[in-house]
């Protein structure tokens, strides 16, 4: 299966030979910041479906985003794939991930520093599937 991943932390090497571990589960310090942005969890022993803790759900969401596997193929250690997908959609609608990104960028900037003097944009241009209108070619000859 395409979604199978080793339990231990994999290490990749960058060009400068610094190794960075792949995050398999969200670290405690990062979770402490992330949970401040999330809505309140359902209290234990409530009627309805079994409760899957938000931390486990977030680990499942990160697994799907990292591996590209289907939600229904999510390993059981992360809970139900449908619950993780539902929470992903809910949190996306609540702009949780954008809030987390901004918060974590501010923390990183405070602790390590971000060089805000330059910006970069990366994009890809592809042909329009329906062709679109043709662009006119303008030739400038002998401009003064």
Image (cartoon, grey):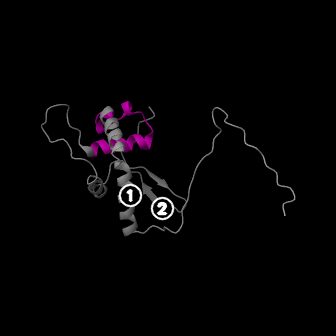
Q: Residue at image x 67%, y 34%? A: 131
Residue, disc 1: 102
Queried whether the magenta region covers residue 77, the answer comes back as yes
Q: Quadrant of residue 32?
A: bottom left
Dominant secondary structure (helix, strand or loop) of the stretch shown in magenta: helix
Determine which of the numbered discs, if any, sits on residue 44 in the image. none
Q: Residue at image x 37%, y 49%? A: 97
Q: Nearer the viewer, residue 138 or 77?
A: 138
How far apart in space, not on screen, are marks 2 and 1 (Cα)?
26 Å
Above-or-below relation of 37 to 93: below
Q: Nearer the viewer, residue 77 or 89?
A: 89
Residue, disc 2: 18
Give the SS element for disc 1. helix
Queried whether the magenta region covers residue 76, the answer comes back as yes
Q: In the picture provided, is 109 more to the left or to the right than 17? A: left
Q: Residue at image x 79%, y 49%? A: 138
In the image, the segment drawn in magenta is 55-81
Spot occupied by residue 48 in the image (x, y as percentages of width and height): 17, 31
């Amino acid at each position: 299966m395409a979604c199978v991943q080793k339990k231990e932390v994999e290490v990749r090497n960058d060009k400068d030979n610094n190794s960075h571990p792949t995050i398999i589960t969200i670290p405690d310090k990062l979770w402490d910041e992330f949970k401040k942005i999330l809505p309140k969890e359902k209290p234990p022993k409530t009627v309805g479906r079994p409760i899957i803790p938000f931390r486990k759900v977030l680990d499942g969401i990160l697994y799907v985003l990292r591996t590209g596997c289907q939600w229904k193929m999510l390993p059981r250690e992360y809970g139900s794939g449908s619950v993780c997908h539902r929470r992903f959609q809910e949190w996306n609608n609540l702009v949780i991930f954008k809030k987390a990104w901004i918060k974590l960028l501010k923390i990183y900037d405070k602790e390590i520093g971000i060089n805000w003097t330059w910006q970069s944009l990366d994009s890809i241009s592809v042909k329009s599937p329906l062709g679109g209108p043709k662009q006119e070619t303008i030739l400038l000859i002998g401009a003064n």
